[in-house]
Image (cartoon, coloured by chain):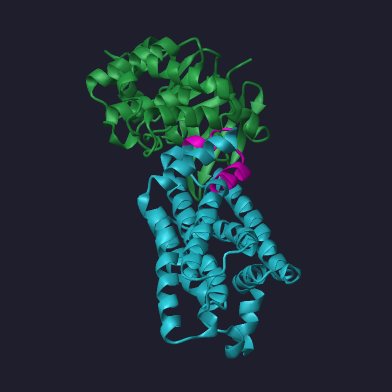
Chain colours: A green, B cyan
Amino acid sequence: MKAIKTTGLSKYYKNLLAIDSLDLEINQGELFSLLGVNGAGKTTTIKCLSCLSKPSSGDAIILGKSILNNVFDVKDLISVSPQETAVAPNLSVLENLEFIIGVNGFKKEDVTQKSRDMIMLFKMEEIENIKAKKLSGGWQRRLSIAMALINEPKILFLDEPTLGLDVIARRELWGIIKNLKKKMTIVLTTHYMEEAEALSDRIGIMSKGKLVALGTAKELIAKTKSKNFEDAFISIASEGGKTK
Amino acid sequence: MKIAALSLRNWKEIVRDKLNISFGLGFPLVLILLLSFIQKNIPVSMFELPQMTPGIIIFGFTFLSLFSGMLIAKDRTSSLFMRLFTSPLKPSHFVLSYYIPFLPIALLQAVFTYFVAVLLGLNLNINILGSILVSLPAAIMFISLGVLCGTIFNDKQVGGICGAFLTNFSAWLSDTWFDIDLVGGAFAGVAKALPFYHAVEAGRFALAGEYSKIFPDLWWVMGYAIAISALAIWIFGKKMNYDK
């Protein structure tokens, strides 16, 4: 069974076509990066796949469950780390983690253990009692991703997880994401080409709502006869898929 | 567990904002003190403690609308809610999680107001407990009004609607500050078609020990509370799916 299979997935906002008949398959355990320039349709695709936004037409099957007909089953399988840092500002780090694990319906006895595990995994021991609003942007982002992971999703959507982080914080997050590979399916959007290249099993490039290229970083470099992946991306994104 | 986790988070958000608690308790205190001093100098039957105290309690509940509306309106536009909307929480879970933490605050408000009224000379008897219990459906009704407003409007609009409009509207039409039968006509008709007047009347009957008379006033309040709650859940569900 595929982790994600979309068929003719489209989304209109009034007259604007944000996703144009997207047909895409993502394997279980795969780290799939969705790239594209601003407005290409990446975030809208994630919103549709995570049941935040209803597609105008088409469907997506998440581990056998339809985003149209099995919304709450799909929500049990997924987790999203949104583009913006998504934490409760007046709660401490520990309280944020306990809060999220609670709303995901875990038993009371699991709450403490899983929260502790996440604090250790993300090295947040020293800040666990500090309110989220008092943390730096990097630590808030780290907490936000920890909150997405704590309910042990089968599919994790990471929407620009390292946006605005310094290079050290970004590399640390890469390490965490690499450790998650194979344990769950990860769909990542990013504007950092080196990030997509370093982390992804496969990469899809979107332009004007369409999926215009699909393959490994090496395959896309070879296909566009580029020197590196960034050049390959520019070639594909600027041509809007003419080379597919 | 899911509702408990979200309720606990909302409770922490409320009590960590000191302004909420100080306004919620402080305003009824100022009013009851002020009107009691007026009553001592210029006796008016309406401002006698058995008449006035249930009215002040209902007036104090309007702040629950403001606080619950502001909290849900701010939450709805936050990235945290984008995350929560992808969790298996249902609209009723969200709405109930706002009711639960505000109910103890309503209870505290009512107890505190009666405590001050007793200090000012109100006869301490078991009917005070009855009157507090009879006021709880009104608390639910005001919380549901806030949740409804917070679901539809943004936090600035909620500030205007619940903070200015509702507080004045419910005060004028509640029979607390003047006898609406003296105004009569359409004004009295409108007041008696709305729940505020009935909430105050039910509280007064309970305080007087006339429990056989609390209905149908209490039916009016309960009917509004149920109808507004159902509407809030329905609209919240719509917003969950298509807001973002």
Task: List x then y, in percent, for residue A159.
Answer: 41, 29
Q: Pinpoint residue B64: horizontal percent, then vertical percent.
A: 50, 58
Q: Quadrant of residue B29?
A: bottom left
Q: Position of residue A13 (x, y in %)?
A: 49, 47
User: Looking at the picture, does residue B197 appear above or below residue B57?
Assistant: below
Q: Position of residue B44 (x, y in %)?
A: 50, 85
**Residue sitting farthest toward the right:** B212
* Most foreground residue, B74 or B58: B58
In the image, residue B48 above or below residue B133: below
The answer to whether B132 is drawn above or below residue A36 in the figure is: below
Question: At 70% across and 63% down in the image, what residue appears?
Answer: B223
Horizontal placement of A228 versus A205: left or right?
left
Q: Residue at x 55, y 26 (%)?
A: A78
Q: Nearer the viewer, residue B186 or A154?
A: B186
Which residue occupies the foreground of this view, B98 or A208? B98
Dominant SS type (magenta)? helix
Q: Is residue B54 above or below residue A159?
A: below
The span picked out in magenta is B83-98
Left or right for A67, reference A156: right
Quarter of the image with the N terminus of chain A is top right
- Magenta span contains residue B85: yes
> Horizontal placement of B57 versus A138: left or right?
right
Q: Residue A128 colored magenta?
A: no
Residue B236 seen in this snapshot: yes
**Residue drawn where x is 46% and y is 26% of the image:** A148
Q: Nearer the viewer, residue B53 or A239?
A: B53
Q: Quadrant of residue A54?
A: top right
* Residue B149 in view, yes or no: no
